[in-house]
Image: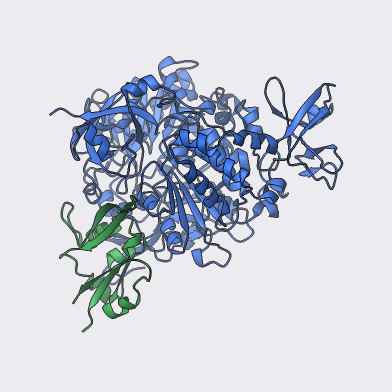
Amino acid sequence: MSRKDGVTIIKTTTWSPGPGCHGGCGVLVHVKDNKVIKVEGDPDHPWNQGRLCSRCLSMTQYMYHPDRLKTPLKRVGKKGEGKFVPISWDEAFDLIEEKMKKIRKDHGPESVIFHQGTGRDIGGWISMLAYAYGSPNWMFGLSGISCYTPRLMMMSITQGDFAVVDASQWHEKRYDDPEYKIPETVTIWGQNLPATCPDGFFGHWYVDLMKRGTQLLVIDPRCTWIASRAKLWLQLRPGTDAALALGFIHVILKENLWDQSFVEKWTNAPFLVMEKAAGPALLRESHLRSGGSDENFVVHDAASGDFVVWDSKDQSYEQPDTTPSLTGAFSLTLADGSSATVKTVWTRYQENAADYTPEKVSEITWVPADKIIQGARMYAKSAPSALHWGLPIDTIPSTIPTSQAINHLWCMTGNLDIPGGNAIARYACDVVTYPYHAGGAILSLPDEVAKKRIGMNDYGPIKDFRAWAQPDKVLEQIFSGDPYEIKGMWIQTANPIACTGMEPGKWRDAIKKLDFTVCVDLFMTPTAMLCDVILPAASFLEKDSLKAWWVPLQAIKKTVDVAECKSDIEINLELSKRFMKDFPYESVHDLFDSLLASAGMTYKDLQEKTWIMPPDGHPSKPYSRHEKGLLRPDGKPGFRTPSGKVELYSSWLEKWELAPMPYHEEPPYSPVSTPDLFKKYPLILCTGRRMGPFFHSEHRQIPWLREQQKEPVLEIHPDTAEKLGINNGEKVCVENWLGKITVTALTTPIIHPDVVMAEHGWWFPEKEGAEPSLFGVWDVNVNQLIPMSNEGKGGLGAPIKSMLCRVYKAKG
Amino acid sequence: MSTYAMLIDYEYCTGCKSCEVACKQEYHRPAGRAGGVEVQEFIHRLPNDQLFITYIPTFTRACVFCAGRVKQGMAPACVKHCMANILTFGKLEDLQQQLPEKRKAILWTKG
């Protein structure tokens, strides 16, 4: 749309770089003389309905910032010395091609790591580049991959699909759609939603729901704004979420607040589990009869007393009219002639939950027992009841049982894939812009290369669920060279020195140790400063792309060019062509057309429409898809799990030799597990809470955002501060056995007296960039107090939000 | 002549500061100075010991109620972009009819 004043208004949608977030908003971009002069919210877009956050409203300052990288740069000084010269794109591509092909020839393609940051517009393109080059080592560098992946993995193996709160985002008319129901209760477990738009979500949807009558149950160590508006706020000890979830389950079972028809029909609750000396195991047809299948399970028929096989392939019992016993213990003779005692999953589940009485859980979590009971009732008695969970569920080594317990809550209360509950979330129209499994990626690798992926032989979930290399193992291998040498790193959308890297000093040493490193970014960062070649990336207003996470399926449209910046996709496509003979795509639009095939449209069609919702009846559109046969590849009712049931007793965890049912495990460093350390470091150090003006390590150079907060703070309770002789606004040292930072004390009653909250992602673009300063990152980066290589069982989770520290006034 | 006013349903203000930056973008205002609106934070400990966080957008002397935008039939920049949809701009007599029934709110007027 062109106006009289020479301004053209372009309708597009967001997905990093720029606002930094996981995107989704519709925007109207005002362009004059090939320059963006204003960005406004698109009132016709169902996601944000005209609203826009301060980061997106600052896009003009972001795009035209004097510090923006404008041309490719080549290092000419020593690593980290900050001496770079501009080079042309041709020179840059030639140099990268030459250096990386040499590494591939001398050491094999697996010796280059392709390192991305959080889930923005990158997963599809960096995996394409890694695989075109031939490396299986595509990686997200956060210890234990502790950002959504553990929850995604757990949902995937429990219920066959991911689920998120249904805030009506699948409906164009949103809250007014007749099919939609406003949740009676939303439980917000560990997230400060108005300050964040996490993982395909818009935080302020919860404010919309509150206005429409939704009540809140908030679980958070801090009294956030949304916690202060909750009907019930549970202030738990960081890292004890599994215990609290099991406390809820205990109350729900004891008071019969679970959904019997859902549990009986759609979960594996009636399946039988053998009690064996080596531990329990699901009873399979192969145990029952010789020649029986390993993939079929067994129930006890209440009517006949027979043991009946559940055929996982046919999704039916071998005997029609089987009425499986939900509870009980039975004896039977196995195929090998031995006798065995078996119990139903549900009986074992009840026994497991029996240990987690409100009193015991209260001791673990600090939440009063009566409030645990109240919370469980509020969650389970509400209809519909939706549960939103946050990053703290990932950032603990016990993330697997924790995610599992919370996932079970919405399953056992019948809130899965119902309006206003937790709806199954798939990529809109099955268009994969961000693959999880190697199978969803644009290219594939030969088996002999794929099996060299770092960490896959150490951890079942790394092998079978997500196509990433395990980052703790990668860092170890960079120094050990075992089982093979790492020689190069391609870093794109990531700033491990300031943000994703725990023990960032090790990441610095690792990056400097390598023969060749490239960083693609929009600004010079502490990480880019250490690299050999730096490529200037385009913001979302300077590129064509597409997004389908989760809905709508939408186009991101190029509105202008800025300097010589290129989009991540263009960069990766050009290099993919150079690395791979017969690379199948000529242009980014060819690639997009191919990705859009499942939606039956071309990229041009999508650009014209800007966004589309999946049609009714499509597997990517709710509700009750398990009943309609829309979830399984075979079209049968049920879920996309090995048994077709929601697996409360997980066959995948059993296969990976992990505990198949949820349990509480103490954080590795805590008053309970390390009392001696706790004497020396008597405060629980939490980190990672969101800051409205900044997304992780970004935006510190944007004037309208930085003015909102000039420096990093440590939240500390006024009583604790007083005991330590610390006044609000004073500089304090935060220290433990791994490191020390100096930040500003913010005394606030919103935090528990025994917990402090440090901000993450800080560095100072205005300070000296060359080493040793690296933009002042070492003074303030709290990750220096958090270890690598403390990943949880399964290679997932790390103690990022539950460390120990001491705090004292800084000298001078 | 009508009195124009801003209805601030501040119970739902989350303190996100979209209003502040929307104003700065609209009028190219510099960082480090107040624009037309600034959000204030209050952390109250209520008599029952409950913590309660309140944010209130306050309009400064620099606010012109977006006269230019309003003349073109658009909402003021802050009203349009408010993430919690708590700002309503209009004639005082109309907004008096729209006051929320069960919670406190502010009517900010300008003749």
x 70%, y 20%: residue? A277
**Quadrant placement of the N terminus of chain B:** bottom left
x 19%, y 66%: residue? B63
Residue A443 in the image: state x and y as whole percent: 55, 37
To which quarter of the image does residue A381 belong? bottom right
Residue A436 at least partly seen: no
**Quadrant placement of the C terminus of chain B:** bottom left
> What chain is colored green?
B
- Residue furthest to the left in view is A812
Residue A3 at least partly seen: yes
Q: Position of A754 compared to A418: left or right?
A: left
- Relative to A262, does residue A466 appear above or below in the rendering? above
Judging depth in this view, the residue of A759 and A172 nearest the camera is A759
Q: Position of A381 compared to A787: left or right?
A: right
Judging depth in this view, the residue of A13 and B20 nearest the camera is B20
- Residue furthest to the right in view is A304
Q: Position of A684 compared to A624: left or right?
A: left
Chain A on-screen colour: blue
Residue A724 in the image: state x and y as whole percent: 22, 31
Judging depth in this view, the residue of A36 and A177 nearest the camera is A177
Residue B101 in the image: state x and y as whole percent: 37, 71
x 34%, y 52%: residue? B48
Judging depth in this view, the residue of A722 and A316 nearest the camera is A722
To which quarter of the image does residue A730 belong? top left
Q: Position of A577 compared to A317: left or right?
A: left
- Residue furthest to the bottom in view is B1
